[in-house]
Amino acid sequence: MTLSHQGDPDYRDSGLKFPDGFIFGSATAAYQIEGAVAEDGRGPSIWDTFSHTPGTILNGDTGDKASDHYHHLEEDLDLMQRLGLHAYRFSISWSRIQPSGRGPVNEKGLAFYERLVDGLLARGIRPIATLYHWDLPQALEDEGGWTNRETAYAFAEYARIMGSALGDRIDTWTTLNEPWCSAYLGYGSGAHAPGHTDGAEALTAVHHLNLAHGLAITELRKVVTNDPDFSITLNLHVVRGEGPGGPEAVRQIDGLGNRVFLGPLLTGAYPADVLADTAGITDWSFVRPGDTEIIRQPIDVLGVNYYSTNLVRLWDGENPRQSADGHKDAEGTPWPGADRVEFVQQAGPYTDMGWNIEPAGLEELLVSLSEEYPDQPLMITENGAAFPDTLVQEADGAAVHDPLRTDYLQRHFTAAHRALARGVDLRGYQVWSFMDNFEWAYGYSKRFGIVYVDYDTEVRTPKDSALWYAKLVATGIIPAA
């Protein structure tokens, strides 16, 4: 096994071998791919409501059909097997299981995930199940959503239902995907469902999402019968500072973006400086005695989503304030209490999302987490890139040539390998995304998939990046791009 952090300065290494047992997979999310939003008893989610609200989604797109995975399940599973994936990280639609977020189980909805999990196992693919990827049942939002403490207890009951149903077959249970986005983009900036713009609501949602994680882990442990890993996935921010106020700007954004989750999850306490920074917005009285003990449940692996870095500085209050944080412009702010911080536009190249491409940031993030939490295993649960893709017809069939995506993946797998060489306990890497999908507020305008989806015909075509990835999965060795 060759583990080295020396190599190409731009992270374009090849020939590096990952350790035996490293888990290569790919990831998706229910609302982004499933479609069938009104079939077999599924209830509406906040994303159904939000995407049907005029002006919220680019081009007026919705997830009503998405990639129609609900009707192409077997075909998609066969394609995963063809690519040799070790694992598939998917999310479960809560409103497909409990249409109103509470009450009886919708057996038809549950049966879909039974077929999915059994289909994965039959093909030798590990199921990594995410319980919540942003699609809260609308009925719970009508009661306050994540600003309502009761939503955390409803989530725990949903986790118990899923653990009872699939608890003999799931390899890894992930409670939440990117609670930062759910809280700050959903309740702070308004860029995501449910579209609220209230800093106090956003911080309340942060805590109730953290609480929901702890309660769900507790319930899952009571009912599962195999020996799964328990996890949560965070989109941790790699933040660099600029200018004399750079360190202070980094401190504030690191607090809101990273430590407000890592603190209670891994050390059992909210950071005192974050509470002080946001004291003018909320008194945090929604944190009740015993909550942080509930939140701090031992997890077997911490999921890490990484796409780009941030450059911040203190705003001078005079020049136009930059807000290049990588998120869609919206009415509110996803950074409550950080009014003096501005996000500086970074040098390219960029992906189609406008995100800077910096594989060094992934290595930096993994190493810093390992140093701060040396006993916590890690997994990259999302990494990938959106680029404009064109389907072409060639003599031997349809093809999508996406050299920029393949180059992106090669460089980021190199970064992951270098982190391993530096002693990071990194267990696997789930490429985002398995297939093109509904990209939230950007609708169908951005393609992240390694598999191309023709949204008119729903025909799937593996891109060149998928063929490159299949070689990596088969050998454990990074191929040349």
Image: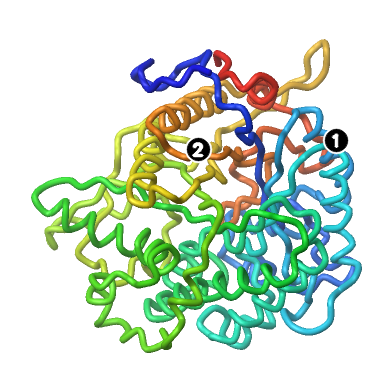
Q: Farthest residue toward the top?
A: 395
Residue nearest the observer in this picture, 70 or 422:
422
Q: Is residue 41 above or below residue 102?
A: above
Task: Using the rendered image of the protein, determine whether residue 334 is visible from the camera's viewpoint.
Answer: no
Q: Residue at x 80, y 71 (%)?
A: 97
- The x, y position of residue 36, in whole percent, is 83, 60
Residue at position x 71%, y 35% in the image:
86
**Which comes before the other along the chain, label 1 or label 2?**
1
Left or right, 68 with reference to 411: right
Name the amino acid type tagged 2. Answer: Asp
Structure colour scheme: rainbow
Question: What kind of element bears circle 1?
Answer: helix
Identify which amino acid the numbered label 1 is placed on: Asp
Q: Nearer the viewer, residue 144 or 107?
A: 107
Quadrant housing residue 103: bottom right
x and y, in percent, of residue 6 in the image: 35, 18
Up the image or down, 49 lies above or below 382; here it is below
Q: Is residue 215 above or below residue 299?
A: below
What number is the disc on residue 78?
1
CA neighbours of label 1 inside 10 A, class few (<14), some (14 to 19), many (20+)? some
Horizontal and vertical percent for residue 53? 62, 70
Label 2 sits on residue: 352
Q: Residue at x 24, y 67 (%)?
A: 339
